[in-house]
Image (cartoon, rainbow, N blue to C red):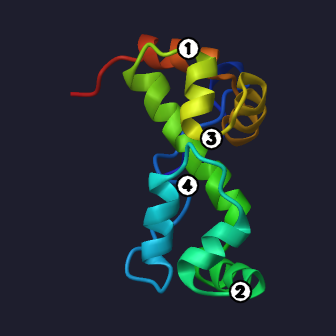
């Protein structure tokens, strides 16, 4: 199936899970822990400690297993969570930014635009206008 990479108005197509599922790997427990703590500051050191490795080993194993850096994976997961909240709640962008670990609405907007080529507000508006599949 061929799908255009960009929708009307330059909006990127939305992929439900742009980061490969990593269940069953050596990092599965740490990835689950990271996902449970998206709203908190997560350093490579804290994630490495959870996994029981040094920071360097953790980063190397993470890249080998996930195909990306821990920070990029974390940002992608936070954007996915922000999308979920935009779709399912009426929370403001500032509150969503806090819940997803971005800290500020500005940071959320920057990462959201980088991943989706649209703003959180425009995403919510498009989501609300989209017809339900059925």
Q: Name the residue under label 2.
A: 54
| 55 shown above or below 19 | below
Q: Earlier in the sequence, mark 4 or mark 2?
A: 4
Q: Name the residue under label 1.
A: 92
Q: In which quarter of the image is residue 7?
A: top right
The residue that appears at 56% across and 14% down in the rendered structure is 92
- Numbered circle sitting on residue 101: 3
In depth, the one of 4 and 46 nearer the eye is 46
User: Answer yes or no: do the residues labelled 4 and 3 have beta carbons within 8 Å?
Assistant: no
Q: Earlier in the sequence, mark 3 or mark 1?
A: 1
Q: Is mark 1 on a helix, strand or loop?
A: loop
Percent x, y of residue 14: 54, 39
Position of residue 116 measured from the top left corner of the image (x, y, whole percent)? 66, 36
Answer left or right for 121 relative to 31. right
User: Mark 2 near mark 1, Cβ–Cβ under 8 Å?
Assistant: no
Q: How would you rate the neighbour count of disc 2 (Cα within 10 Å): few for under 14, some for 14-19, many for 20 or more?
A: some
> Whole-Å distance between the Cαs marked 3 and 1?
14 Å
* Residue 115: % across, % down: 69, 42
According to the picture, the residue beneath numbered tag 4 turns out to be 18
Q: Are marks 4 and 1 in contact (CB under 8 Å)?
A: no
As helix, strand or loop, the secondary structure at mark 4 comes to: loop
- In whole angstroms, how far apart are the C-alphas of marks 3 and 2? 24 Å
| Mark sitting earlier along the chain (2/1) | 2
**In the rendered image, is residue 51 in sight?**
yes
Which badge, 4 or 3, comes first in the chain's sequence? Answer: 4
The quarter of the picture where residue 61 lies is: bottom right
Quadrant containing the C terminus in the rendered view: top left
Which residue is depicted at the point 78% across and 32% down? 110
Residues at marks 4 and 1, CA–CA distance in whole angstroms: 24 Å
Nearer the observer: mark 2 or 1; the answer is: 2
């Amino acid at each position: 199936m061929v799908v255009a990479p960009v929708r009307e108005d330059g909006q990127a197509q939305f992929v439900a899970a742009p980061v490969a599922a990593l269940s069953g790997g050596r990092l599965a427990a740490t990835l689950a822990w990271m996902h449970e703590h998206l709203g908190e500051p997560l350093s490579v050191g804290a994630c490495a400690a959870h996994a029981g490795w040094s920071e360097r080993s953790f980063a190397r194993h993470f890249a080998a297993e996930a195909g990306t850096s821990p920070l990029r994976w974390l940002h992608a997961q936070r954007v996915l969570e922000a999308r979920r909240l935009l779709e399912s709640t009426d929370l403001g962008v500032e509150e969503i930014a806090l819940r997803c670990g971005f800290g500020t609405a500005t940071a959320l907007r920057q990462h959201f635009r980088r991943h989706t080529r649209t703003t959180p507000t425009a995403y919510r508006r498009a989501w609300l206008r989209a017809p339900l599949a059925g």
